[in-house]
Structures are given as structure tokens and as C-alpha cells.
Image (spheres, grey):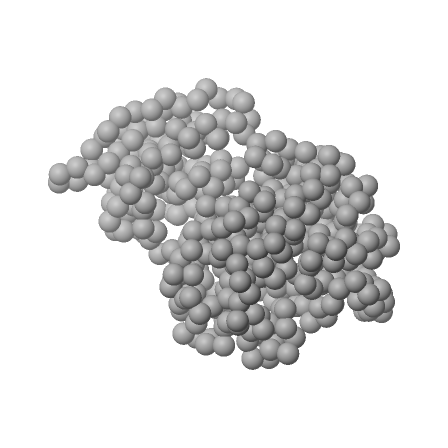
Amino acid sequence: MSANPHASLHPCFNAEVKGSCGRVHLPVAPLCNLRCNYCNRKYDCANESRPGVTSGLLTPHQAVEYLARVLAEEPRITVAGIAGPGDPLANPQATLQTLRLVRQRFPELLICLSSNGLALPDHLEEVAALASHVTLTINAVDPEVGARIYAWARQGKVVYRGRAAAELLLERQMEALAGLKEHGVMVKVNTIIIPGVNDQHVAQVAGRVAGLGADLHNLMPLYPNADTPFAEVSEPGAQQMDALRQICAGHLPQMSHCTRCRADAVGLLGQDRSPQMRGCLVSCSQLPEPAPPDRPYVAVASREGALVNLHFGQAARFQVWGPAPGGYALIEERQAPAPGGGVERWYRLAELLKDCRAVLVSGIGETPGLILEESGVTTLEMEGFIDQGLRAVYEGLDASLLKVRKVKPCQGGAGGSCY
């Protein structure tokens, strides 16, 4: 794509406009395909600004409505971006649909994407057509160093660990960076400085990404997070960071005004308004999502066919309901895959329900809920009559009778709950 004439209005890429141009991050991407040893998105503190945390999740249409309300409140916004709380391209359907809707409704805005790069080559053409700016987090260009930073990487349904994960990630990151530059996208590379792990390696990172055409380099000090392998590693001080930036400046221009934005950051850099916009975000997250025409049905987990009273994982079969004259009708029953098989069972269930816009259950675990969300099926937790749930889905009525499940960001960890 050609260079955007308003590229200088991106406050992360141009420090001169950080006091006059703002950004908004749209939190539509809960899933992550990479487990970083410094990352823990479990905690959301209203006064904490760091990547990976958000006070709510939005669907694409909710995100665009939220964006409209943000712009009415803060007209200095020039950039709409997606930065998680997981990785945007581990959630390609939601991310790309959001970007398309933003481009259609707000063509004057710059569009930005932040990614680890692992899945970006699979969506390179569309990302380059929609986004003028992309940030890639590249912490190592040596797999031996990378193996100390990442616990695992997931490509499709395959999980790689150790050096294999680091090699795969590096290969995909280099492919993503080169491809973005071939398409004229401005690229910033973020590198998390982890003392004793990659602080002596950062000049190699700068040299490698500069050789592929990166436009800007942002060294970010490690933010020690509880319950992570790097929890006890000290955050590098300002003097060390300044010294490393001077070294890397020989390869690339350095960003020194980063504020470690949240996944729901709003406003000017250094003047984040996400606490003030939290109520708006939560309100928009409860708006009904228009159902795609290829998903006319609703699946139900029920023992006897009258009440929603089965946990998703316990249902041996699902009733499939659809609109009918005067109300709703049972279309058919579908046999669920036999228990066992780990995460593969949840993917098979998502495929079984691919023509359903929602599933009504009494409860659901985090992993199957995330997989359904990734495949476009909304999960509603409730107890009550099936008809009440159907009315809530199709008509937007009686919503107070339902507890709408909001998928929590992936927690990861050795237990493998992400995958």
C-alpha cells in the first residue's frame, strides 16, 4: 500500500504530536498464541498501565460503537488500534472484521496493529491493506535467547516448546517484517529488555530488524509480573535503558516516549483516559451483536428439553433451535463428541455448532469458551426456560435473566489452559 499522508499523526511513531494526537485501543482479541515468561494478564488494576490488561472485551460491532462514543468524547484521537489483550492475529476473525468496520465508518483514522508476528504472515495481505502502522514485539533474534523468553508457541493446533518455539517464532517474525515493508507499512519493533536474558543481545536485534527495513525501535523495560518465571527479575533502570538506546540508535531511530499502553488505552500518551471510559467500555460490551446470516440457529444444553440446565462439557447432545412462525422451534438434536481427547474435543464441538450464533449453557470452562468465541459462537450462561434464552438472543429481550459470559483473557501457565 502507498504511504499514508497522515502517517505523522501517529503519536507512537512521531513524538512531536504526542500532546495533540491520541489513540484508542479496541480490546477484541482475548486469545494468545505465545506464552511469554514475563506475561500475566490475570490482574486488571484501574491505575495500572501495561500491555495485556483490559477492563472488558468487545465484539467487532461493539468495538465500532465504542469507538464512535470515544471520538465524541475525545476528538483528538487520530489512531484506532488493536493490541490485545491477547495477540490480535491469534483472533483473526474478530480482529480483521473490526479493522474492516473501522475503515468503513471512520476512513480518516489511522489503523494500527500490535502483534508478536507469529500468525501475521497468514494474514499479511489484508493487514497491509487495512493498517498503516504495525508494531511487532521482537525480543530475540537468536533461538537460544528466545528459548529463555518463551514457554511455548502455538501454530494452529500444534504447540511448540523451547528452542523449537523460538525458532518458529523468529522465522515468522522475520517473514512478517519483510512482508510488511514490501507493502509500504510503517513498522515499529518493540523489544522487552530482560536483565540477564536479552539485555546483551539487544544490539543484534536492532541490527537484524534494521536490515529488514524497520522504521522505529522501542526498548521497553521488563515489567515484573507476579506468578511468572521472571517475577523476581528486577526492572532495568533508566540509566541502563538510556545506554541501550544509545547503542541501538546506531541501527535505528529510538522511541523514548512509550507509556506501556493497556489493551484498552484511550487518549493522549501520558494522559490515559481508560479509567474514565471504563463505564462506556462495559456498556458497549453488553450491546447485542448483529448475527451473520450464515448462523441462523441457537444451540442449547438441556437435560429434558425445557430448561437450560447442563454444563457445556457435560452435554451428550445439543438441541438446535431456530425462528418459527409465532416463536421458535426445535430444528434437530446433534450428538456431541465423546468425552476425552483434550482440546481437540472443543474444536470438534465448535465445528458441530458452526451454524449457531450462540449456545445456551448452565456453565462452561475457559478453554472451550475461548475456542467457541474464536469460531464466532457466543456463549450465554443461564438457568431458566429455553424460550427465555432464545428471546434474549433473537429479540434482545429479558437479558436480565441471563448471565452473559464474557471470555476472560488467557491465563496460560504450565497447566496449558490456553490450549
Using the image as rendered, state which of residue 353 and residue 226 is in the foreground.
353
> In this rendering, is residue 84 above or below 303?
below
Q: Position of residue 258 (x, y in %)?
A: 67, 68
* Quarter that holds the C terminus: top right
Q: Residue at x 66, y 43 (%)?
A: 172
Numbered label tally: 0
Using the image as rendered, state which of residue 372 and residue 4 is in the foreground.
4
Using the image as rendered, state which of residue 137 and residue 183 is in the foreground.
183
Using the image as rendered, state which of residue 303 and residue 414 is in the foreground.
414
Left or right: 1 in relation to 207: left
Q: Does residue 224 appear in the picture of this structure? A: no
Taking the view exactly as shown, the residue that stands out farthest to the top is 338
Instruction: Please tell me in which quadrant of the rendered image residue 410 appears.
Output: top right
Q: Residue at x 24, y 36 (%)?
A: 322
Q: Does residue 143 appear in the picture of this structure? A: yes
Left or right: 119 in relation to 328: right
Q: Position of residue 111 (x, y in %)?
A: 51, 62
Instruction: Please tell me in which quadrant of the rendered image residue 13 appears.
Output: bottom right
> In this rendering, is residue 389 above or below 210?
above
Left or right: 264 in relation to 244: left
Q: Residue at x 28, y 39 (%)?
A: 296
Q: Position of residue 398 (x, y in %)?
A: 27, 50
Q: Position of residue 361 (x, y in %)?
A: 38, 36
Q: Residue at x 31, y 46 (%)?
A: 291
